[in-house]
């Protein structure tokens, strides 16, 4: 059971906007720790997509954006493209005994 | 450009020992932590532990403490993940990644990842 909860799957048609939620608790996101997002294309290593809640590394299209509020965070993808079909993971820091850096369980995005 | 290159896929039997490696390309390898992350087949990412190549300071996730050993040889810019007795449940893809962040460890994210090493444990 992940300490950060994501929906197992989301889907959308090309051109649409989709959002992926990441729900935590008072020991991680709710404690004020930043949320980061990764994209994992099939058969490849994860790639940093968003860091510090809403910042994009160089080379990541501005179709991807992140936000955080309270004990949750969201990743939004605008203008959905076929190549966005991937698994997406959120990640944060947790100050409980269960560990330091925690990931969400991942969300499979299907482009219809 | 930072590169982390992992050793090749392994097929082992239960009870075997194993050490996989992650070689860094950057001249500042000793300045940044290196983390290990597990991904079981069809499952999500799990942080296992981190090591600082500069002084070998090592921290483990409680879930992996005592199950694996993380080490480093800074002379060859290489970090290691080691098992003394593998189990079938250790079958997974293992990644090394570089944690970085403006706020120190509470703000760490993983900006560079190795390509992954698939470890298969089967009798």
Image: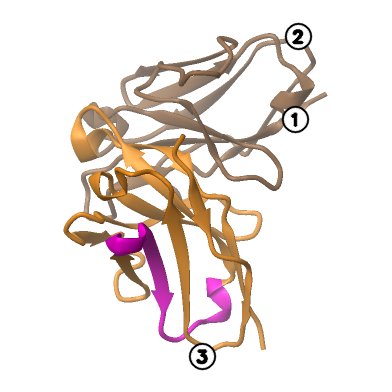
Chain colours: A brown, B orange
Which chain does the residue under circle 3 lie in?
B
Residue A62 position (above or below residue A58): above
In the rendering, at what x and y percent does residue B123 appear?
67, 89
> Do discs 3 and 1 belong to a common subunit?
no
In the rendering, at what x and y percent does residue B96 appear?
45, 53
Please, what secondary structure does the residue beneath circle 3 have? Answer: loop
In the rendering, at what x and y percent does residue A7 appear?
58, 35
Which chain does the residue under circle 2 lie in?
A
Mark 1 closeness class: few <14, some 14–19, many ≥20 residues within 10 Å: some
Alpha carbon distance from label 3 to label 1:
40 Å
Residue A66 position (above or below residue B1): above
Residue B120 position (above or below residue B42): below
Q: Nearer the viewer, residue B14 or B75?
A: B75
Q: Residue furthest right?
A: A112
In the rendering, at what x and y percent does residue B80 appear?
39, 67
As for residue B77 lying within the magenta part, the answer is yes
As for residue B36 lying within the magenta part, the answer is no
Alpha carbon distance from label 3 to label 2:
51 Å
> Do discs 1 and 2 belong to a common subunit?
yes
Alpha carbon distance from label 1 to label 2:
13 Å
Q: Is residue B93 left or right of residue B35?
A: right
Residue extent of the magenta highlight: B73-90
Q: Which residue is mark 1?
A: A110
The residue shown at (48%, 21%) is A74
Q: Looking at the image, do the residues carrying marks 3 and 1 touch, with CB atoms under 8 Å apart?
A: no
Q: Which residue is mark 3?
A: B15
Residue B14, picture quadrant: bottom right
The residue shown at (71%, 15%) is A80
The residue shown at (30%, 76%) is B66
Q: Earlier in the sequence, mark 1 or mark 2?
A: 2
Q: Which residue is mark 2?
A: A15
């Amino acid at each position: 059971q992940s300490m950060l909860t994501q929906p197992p799957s989301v889907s959308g048609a090309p051109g649409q906007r989709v959002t992926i939620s990441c729900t935590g608790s008072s020991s991680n996101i709710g404690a004020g720790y930043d949320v980061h997002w990764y994209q994992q294309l099939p058969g490849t290593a994860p790639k940093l997509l968003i860091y510090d809640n809403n910042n994009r590394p160089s080379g990541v299209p501005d179709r991807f954006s992140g936000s955080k509020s309270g004990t949750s965070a969201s990743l939004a993808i605008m203008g959905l493209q076929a190549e966005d079909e991937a698994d997406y993971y959120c990640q944060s820091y947790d100050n409980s005994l269960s560990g330091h850096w925690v990931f969400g369980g991942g969300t499979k995005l299907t482009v219809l | 450009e930072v590169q982390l290159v992992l050793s090749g896929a392994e097929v082992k039997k239960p009870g075997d020992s194993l050490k996989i490696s992650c070689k860094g390309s950057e001249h500042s390898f000793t300045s940044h932590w290196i983390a290990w992350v597990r991904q079981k087949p069809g499952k999500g990412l799990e942080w296992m532990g981190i090591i600082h190549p500069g002084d070998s300071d090592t921290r483990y996730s409680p879930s992996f403490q005592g199950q694996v050993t993380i080490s480093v040889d800074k002379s060859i810019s290489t970090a290691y993940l080691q098992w003394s007795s593998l189990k079938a449940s250790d079958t997974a893809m293992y990644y090394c990644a570089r944690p970085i962040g403006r706020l120190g460890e509470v703000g760490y994210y993983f900006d560079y990842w190795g390509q992954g090493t698939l470890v298969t444990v089967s009798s």
